[in-house]
Amino acid sequence: MSKLFEVLPLEANLRSQPLLVPKTVITRLRQGQRVEEVSIIPSPPAGWRRVRAELQGTPVEGYIKAFLLKKADPAPVLPPAPVLPNIPEASLRSPNPVRRNQSGDGSRVYGLTEPNQPGCPGPAPTDRALQLGAILGYLHVSRSARYAAGKGKTYCNIYAHDYADLAGAYLPRVWWTRKALVALAAGQAVNPAYGTTVQELNANSLYNWLEEFGPDSGGRRSVDLTEVQNAANTGQVCLISGQRKEPKRTRAYLRRGARNGPAPRYKKGRAGDVAANEPGRGNQLRVWGSGEVDGSAVCSVWVLDSRLNYLTTR
C-alpha cells in the first residue's frame, strides 16, 4: 500500500539527488501538496524520502527531506467540481501601428502590427525550427527599441509575448481582472478594456499566470531541460519563467538552443541576445528555438529552485 504525505512548510524543495546543493533542486512543492512515497533500492539516505508528485498535470519524482512531510489524512470525498466555461484569451488591439522601433510604454501593451511579419511555423519539424529562428532574427532584441531597458524598467515579458504571438502560441500581455474572470465564469460576455477588465502582466505575474492557466492555454509543464531542448530543436515553442522572491530588478534573455547540442548549462557562454541588461539576478524569461544565435554572453544565474518549463502544443 502506498504511503501518502503532505508538505508541511509553505514551500519545500524537491531534488534530483539527496544533496542540499542548489543544482539538485527540481522544483518547489507548496504547503499541503500530496506526494506518494516511492520504494527504491537502495533506500534513500537517512532523513530523506523519494516521492512522486504532480505539477499542473505533469508527474515528477525526486527527493525531499523527511521532516518537511507529514502523513496525509484520508482524502475527503468531495462533490464533482463544477464545469466552468473556457476562459477566452485576453488581448488589446491598437488603433495605431505598433513597431519594433517604438520605445514608449503605451505601445508596449499591444502586440506588433508591422507589415510582412514572420508567420506561424509550418507543420514539419525542420520547417518549424527554421521559421522560429526567423522570428528570433526578426525581433532582433538587442537592436529593437521596444525591448531596450531604461529608467529602471526591463521588457523581457514584452519580448516573450511577441515571440510567442508570432509563433502561434499564447502568452498574455494583458489578462483579465478578478471581477472579469468571475463574470466570464458565469457565462457573461466581457470586452477587454485596459484598467477595467484587463491589466498588464509583468515577469512575476507571468510566472503565476503560467502556473494557474498555462495548461489550459496550450502549455505543458516539464521539469526536464533535456526534454525542453529536444522539443526546441524540433521547432516547438519553449519558455522558461522564473520568479524572483525579493523585490529587485528583473533580468531576462532570449535564447535559442543549440541545433543538436545538449541542454543549456547555468554559466557564462555564447548563449543569445540579451533582452534586458540589468545587473544581478531576477525574474527571468527565456524563449528557446533552434539554431545558433548572433549573440552576446549570458551573465545571469537562473533562479533554479522556482523555474517553470512549458512546452506549447500549438
Image (spheres, helix red, strand yellow):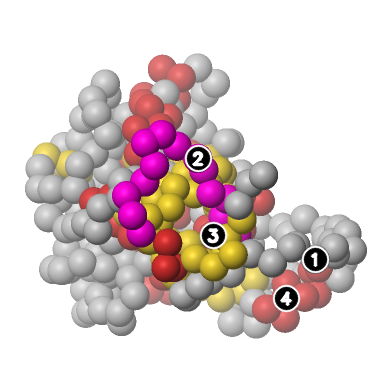
Q: Nearer the viewer, mark 1 or mark 2?
A: 2
Label 1 – label 2 distance at C-alpha: 25 Å
Q: Nearer the viewer, mark 3 or mark 2?
A: 2
Q: Is residue 288 above or below residue 179?
A: above
- Residue for badge 2: 39
Taking the image as drawn, is residue 113 in sight? no
Q: Earlier in the sequence, mark 4 or mark 2?
A: 2
Amino acid type for the residue under numbered disc 1: Pro
- Residue for badge 3: 211
Q: Residue at x 38, y 55 (%)?
A: 48
- The image quadrant where one finds the N terminus is top right
Amino acid type for the residue under numbered disc 3: Glu
- Residue for badge 1: 76
Q: Residues within 10 Å of mark 3 (few under 14, many from 20)?
A: some
Amino acid type for the residue under numbered disc 2: Ser
- The image quadrant where one finds the C terminus is top right
Q: Residue at x 46, y 75 (%)?
A: 9
Q: Nearer the viewer, mark 4 or mark 2?
A: 2
Q: Residue at x 17, y 63 (%)?
A: 277
Segment tinted magenta in the rendering: 33-47
Q: Earlier in the sequence, mark 1 or mark 3?
A: 1
**Res 6 quadrant in image:** bottom right
